[in-house]
């Protein structure tokens, strides 16, 4: 039997200083540790956008070759992703937070045209239809209500022609698109478009027209597509040739959308490398281009990404292959900068939506509160497949029954519970893989309707800390202060090599894993005795900004591969109890609320010495956090972007916190109107998570979560 440990650092302020105590570990039953390096693990996987001083690219050892010329295209895409960071950094200014489209655009801008692109699919009156199939007369009703509400219909080409004159557009603009080229478009949608005087763009999956899949509704023929294109009401776009499918994405035969998946090649027991991935995407786009030219008789320059999935490399390849404009499914409005960069977000129309209603809920839906369980894979993994799968199933059932709609899932292995990371639970090129299981477990949660965020360190890069002593954080305690070096094997946030290592690490995460969010762990702090390098000013504010710049570089790198990812960061409770930058942590609640989609306050009452007055302390903390976070609610779909996370285990005594105490803490925070709540740790076989304790709401589905 293998025995791992859950660990937690405990920070207690004493006389203005801070002492770190080693907590009592929690034993976990498990199996024998197993280290397995996958083929190619010694090499870094890709061209990755990073920056040291000015802008540069870090290129690790190549996978099966690849010249500098081949890399040039993706360089352009990464430069775009990081441009806002580099300009501000070089000027010594505070860099703006990197955020995904959907997170940044939870509310309309004022004083600028409001533009939205709707994405329809099939039209049918069949009661058994999918949620993104709507009745034909409801489609007609959408068009009429939008017009009555003051929206102006433009074709996609008409919108694109205004790229340099965006501010001259009508106040509210709608563009209609249809994906997949179902026969219902020709027989039902096109007559309605004619009658209502509305133009639309039809995106065609060329391989599907040549050989229609048997599990789809009837598709159009090439003759019908040509006739529609010649009607004066329809513009033709590509929906790829054969990328509208799912690919095997891990050794457990789970699947993910083709464009954003590095395929797992089961026969070779390895992942698709950079050049194989790039060739696959490029070759498909070339076939899509030539097929449409041959069958429609005209060049097509717009590509709608299958399932709305894309990344910086795929977008650059599309541009090189003659698709300067691509369409996604980010679920938000189109802005001036989108027309310039050539990628436009769309809103997928589902049966429950009501475009044209008196409000904009269909364009800016209110977000569901996040109710999260934080789980450690150390307590789940076992080399015996039967034991491992049983634990996964029990963990998923337990978290779902507890009412969670989100799980924060550990990314790095820490079986000893000492915070010294030497292995990962996913494919990467930075450190050995203990077991490639993160993706498989994530898929289990997603099938249960639970969103999955990866929890990982951004400064506690233990493997680099061992290899590069010069990257370590300088430490100089105050004179006369008997304070040992703080816990965590962390690297300095202002060392170029350390920053690049963090970018490389998180780029691997984004390339190989279907992450919906990243939770930066509690290692990103600097104590009073820790300094910046080269005798730079080490005020709490300067140290806080150095950490912030590191995290923003990492966020930009993740967004290059997962443009819809959300970001959160753990915050120590003492930081939330005061204004400004806390000198013992170099963290600032207000800055966190500005920078992250979710600020996760670790409201660990017992750890902070409030066991006897836990409810009172939590209520006071919750009220303060909610008051501070309220200012950001409009930006974040009506919800303050803050969470209180409660401890389910007492690391000092080595005992589980009674479920009644955890429930009381959750109730106190909810009464203080904090919408986002979490619990840590949640394990498959130990500790109690009462049914419904978190009372979460399952996130809405999307086409990206369903196979075609």
Image: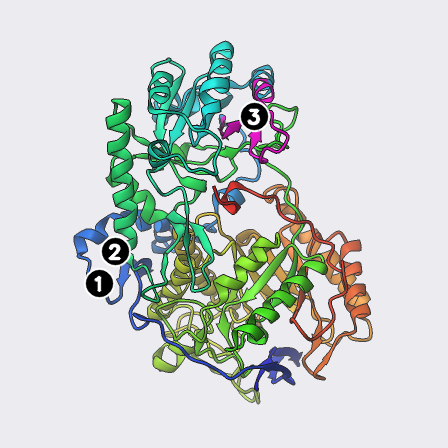
Which residue is at the far front?
214
Q: Quadrant of the N terminus?
A: bottom right
Q: Where is residue 480 drawn, in percent x and y?
A: 56, 89
Q: Residues within 10 Å of mark 1 (few under 14, many from 20)?
A: few
Question: Which residue has dot 2 on it?
Answer: 275
Q: Where is residue 349 drawn, in percent x and y?
A: 55, 31
- Secondary structure of the residue carrying numbered label 1: loop
Question: Which residue has dot 3 on it?
Answer: 124
- Secondary structure of the residue carrying numbered label 2: helix
Residue at 29 percent of width and 30 percent of height: 301
Q: Where is residue 19 drawn, in percent x and y?
A: 61, 82
Instruction: Give the extent of the magenta segment.
Output: 114-140
Q: Where is residue 355 drawn, in percent x and y?
A: 59, 26
Mark earlier in primary sequence (2, 3): 3
The answer to whether one can see residue 74 in this image is: no
The figure's colour scheme reads rainbow
- Above or below, comparing residue 358 to residue 41 in the picture: above
What whole-number distance in Å separates the C-alpha atoms at marks 2 and 3?
A: 42 Å
């Amino acid at each position: 039997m293998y025995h791992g440990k859950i660990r937690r650092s405990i920070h207690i302020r004493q006389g203005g200083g801070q002492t770190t105590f080693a907590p009592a570990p929690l034993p976990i039953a498990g199996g024998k540790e197993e280290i397995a390096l996958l083929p190619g693990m010694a090499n870094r996987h890709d061209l990755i956008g990073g920056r040291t001083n000015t802008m540069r690219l870090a290129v690790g050892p190549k996978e099966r070759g690849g010249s500098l010329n081949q890399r040039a295209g993706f360089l352009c895409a990464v430069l775009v992703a990081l441009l806002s960071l580099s300009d501000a950094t070089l000027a010594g200014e505070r860099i703006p937070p990197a955020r995904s489209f959907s997170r940044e655009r939870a509310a309309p801008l004022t004083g600028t045209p409001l533009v939205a692109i709707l994405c329809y699919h099939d039209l049918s009156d069949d009661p058994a239809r999918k949620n993104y199939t709507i009745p034909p007369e409801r489609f007609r009703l959408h068009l009429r209500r939008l017009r009555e509400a003051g929206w102006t219909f433009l074709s996609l080409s008409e919108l694109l022609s205004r790229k340099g004159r965006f501010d001259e557009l009508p106040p509210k603009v709608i563009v209609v698109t249809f994906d997949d080229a179902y026969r219902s478009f020709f027989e039902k949608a096109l007559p309605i478009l004619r009658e209502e005087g509305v133009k639309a763009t039809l995106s065609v999956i060329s391989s599907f027209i040549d050989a229609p899949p048997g599990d789809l509704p009837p598709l159009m023929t090439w003759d019908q597509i040509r006739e529609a294109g010649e009607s004066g009401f329809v513009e033709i776009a590509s929906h790829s040739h054969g990328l509208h499918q799912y690919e095997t994405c891990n050794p457990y035969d789970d699947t993910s959308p083709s464009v954003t998946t590095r395929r797992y090649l089961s026969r070779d027991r390895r992942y698709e490398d950079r050049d194989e991935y790039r060739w696959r995407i490029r070759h498909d786009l070339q076939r899509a281009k030539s097929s449409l030219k041959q069958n429609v008789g005209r060049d097509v320059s717009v590509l709608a990404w299958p399932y709305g999935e894309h990344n910086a490399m795929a977008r650059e390849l599309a541009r090189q292959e003659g698709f300067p404009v691509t369409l996604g499914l980010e679920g938000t409005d189109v802005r001036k900068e989108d027309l310039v960069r050539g990628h436009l977000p769309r809103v997928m129309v589902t049966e429950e939506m009501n475009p044209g209603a008196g409000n904009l809920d269909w364009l800016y839906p209110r977000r569901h509160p996040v109710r999260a369980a934080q789980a450690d894979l150390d307590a789940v993994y076992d080399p015996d497949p039967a034991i491992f799968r049983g634990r996964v199933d029990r963990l998923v059932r337990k978290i779902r029954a507890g009412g969670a709609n989100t799980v924060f899932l550990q990314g790095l292995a820490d079986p000893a519970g000492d915070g010294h990371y030497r292995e990962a639970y996913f494919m990467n090129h930075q450190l050995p893989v203990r077991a490639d299981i993160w993706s498989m477990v994530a898929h289990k949660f997603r099938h249960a309707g639970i969103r999955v965020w990866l929890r990982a360190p951004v400064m506690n890069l233990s493997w680099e800390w061992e290899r590069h002593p010069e990257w370590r954080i300088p430490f100089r305690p105050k004179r006369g202060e008997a304070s040992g070096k703080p816990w965590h094997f962390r690297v300095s946030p202002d060392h170029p090599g350390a920053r690049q290592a963090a970018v490389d690490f998180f780029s691997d995460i984004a390339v190989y894993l279907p992450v919906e969010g990243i939770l930066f762990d509690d290692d990103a702090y600097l104590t009073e005795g820790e300094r910046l390098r080269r005798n730079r000013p080490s005020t709490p504010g300067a140290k806080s900004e150095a950490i912030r710049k590191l995290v923003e570089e990492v966020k930009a790198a993740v967004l290059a591969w997962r443009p819809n990812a959300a970001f959160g960061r753990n915050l120590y409770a003492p930081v939330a109890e005061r204004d400004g930058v806390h000198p013992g942590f170099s963290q600032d609640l207000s800055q966190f609320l500005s920078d992250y989609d979710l600020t996760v306050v670790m409201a660990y009452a017992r750890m902070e010495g409030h066991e006897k007055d836990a409810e009172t302390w939590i209520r006071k903390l919750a009220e303060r956090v909610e008051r501070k976070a309220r200012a950001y609610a409009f930006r974040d779909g009506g919800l303050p972007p803050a969470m209180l996370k409660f401890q389910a285990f007492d690391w000092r005594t080595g005992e589980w916190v009674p479920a009644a105490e955890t429930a009381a803490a959750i109730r106190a925070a909810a009464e203080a109107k904090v919408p986002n709540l979490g619990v840590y740790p949640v394990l498959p076989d130990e500790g109690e998570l009462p049914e419904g304790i978190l009372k979460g709401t399952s996130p809405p589905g999307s086409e990206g979560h369903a196979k075609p």
